[in-house]
Image (tube, rainbow, N blue to C red):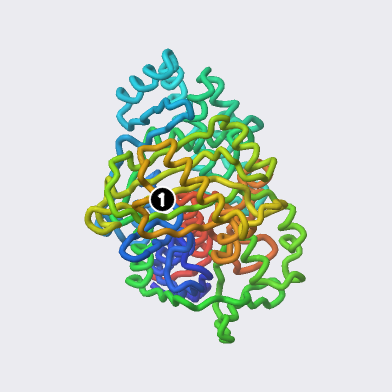
Amino acid sequence: MSTDIKRKILIIGAGPGGLSAGMILAHRGFDVTIYEKKPFIGGRNSGLKIDGYTFELGPTFVILPQTFREIFSLAGRNIDDMLEIKSLDPLYELHYDDGRAITMYFDKPKLKQEIARLFPGEEVGYEKFMISQKKKFDRLYACLKVPYIRFYNYLRWKLIKAAPVLDLGVSVHDVLSRYFKDEDLKIAMAFQAKYLGMSPWECPGAFTILSYVEHEFGVHHPIGGVHKISEAMGKVVEENGGKINLGMGVKEVILEGKKAKGVLLENGEKVFADAVIMNADFAEGMSHLFKNEDRSKYNDESLAKKDYSCSTFMLYLGIDKKYEMKHHQIFFAKDYKKNVEQIFNGKTLPEDPSFYIQNVSVTDTTLAPDGHSTIYVLVPVPNQKDTKIDWTIEKKRYRDLVIKKIIEKTDLADLEEHIKVEKVITPADWQNDANVYDGAVFNLSHSLDQMLYLRPHNRLEGYKDFYIVGGGTHPGSGLPTIMESGRIVADLIGGSVKTNS
């Protein structure tokens, strides 16, 4: 088989979207080269190694494992031959400020007993919720696997069929209120909106499928860490004939009119190709890889007007003892709605934060020295846009506040005295060191005016031979959907290939 159009493909960034597109295209016979600014692959899905402890920089679990298997199969590989992916049960444990906790089991009978124990009678609503969300998921999932390049793509039969169950015009919280009466149980089924960096009171109702997906298909952990998926994809890219250049950043996309012709590397070298794929953070990439006059739709002014996700305050702690607390735990603020409003509307730091803790060593002993633990802490906080938070002042204070809350609310009463390794990442660090626009780690928000056709297109509108993958394009943020964006772009490019067998 020979190809004579778009044979040479350049990919800017070795995050999961770029790696997904790269390994599929390389398998299909394209000449694929990836340029990554950092000395490691994975982007925000990379590993963070400090003095014998290994952390996830970003995602800490896998949902929809079937998506990963599909993507790898398109590149000629079986992911299960490369990684051991372990299903977790329970999925996670959720804690309320008054000391109550609910364990979310993957085992449905056990979960319904747990709901009945804490929220008597609500187990009936749970059954109805799962039935309704299955119908929504079955219809919506297919819509997320195809591009929306033209407005008439809204007339796809898949989307027309899905429209009646998408709950457009209502929020995640509104949808949950149909099935549950207790506000605390609604929070337990709504916090997944944070995966999109959104408030459950503002996140479109379609995204109740996130909690359904966890409960129906489970939460999973690849032994060695979620970042091992990125490493496996990088290996497949190279085994399929592609090249990955680490520590080689791209300075600019070379245009001829609006046609992408290649890239100018930071070292001054020009590299030309038939198509360019951008895997950078969308707004950050558009801001720095193009001259302002070359991007009329996505110039600095229009990018600043878009709505972005929240950010995160991160603690990575290497501990010289083993803790037996659950693998995934979430601790809700006393007033969860106020906490969310402070982050998204007030743009202030919550003094009573909600936070997530991953105690991965209870499941995976490969990530810390024998008898030690790695503790990962994520606190949702405002992004950098229109905020007066000065992280040079707040970094140490907020770190101490979060540690204090952990000691007060968890079984980690002796945490402080056992910390041997520590790293803190603030929204300012995400922005300045990780090249994330305004530190919005979940990218563009998923409001109705920034979804499907209204989200930046996978084949970016206004350009020729220029494609984008990642959380800033369709289908959106989250590891499975980011990898789907890579598959979509591979298919768009592959669809324009002339082959002779």
Residue at 51% x, 73% y is: 37
* Residue that sits furthest to the top in the current view: 121
Q: Is residue 116 above or below residue 418?
A: above
* Residue that sits furthest to the front in the current view: 417
Q: Which residue is mark 1?
A: 376
3 lies left or right of 274? left
Answer with the quarter of the image where residue 50 lies. bottom left
Number of other residues with Cα within 10 Å of mark 1, as a class: few under 14, some 14 to 19, many 20 or more: many
Q: Nearer the viewer, residue 192 or 74?
A: 192
Residue at 64% x, 78% y is: 254
Q: Nearer the viewer, residue 9 or 363?
A: 363
Residue at 53% x, 70% y is: 12
Q: Is residue 252 above or below residue 74?
A: below
229 lies left or right of 270? left
Answer with the quarter of the image where residue 472 lies. bottom right
Residue 412 visible, this angle? yes
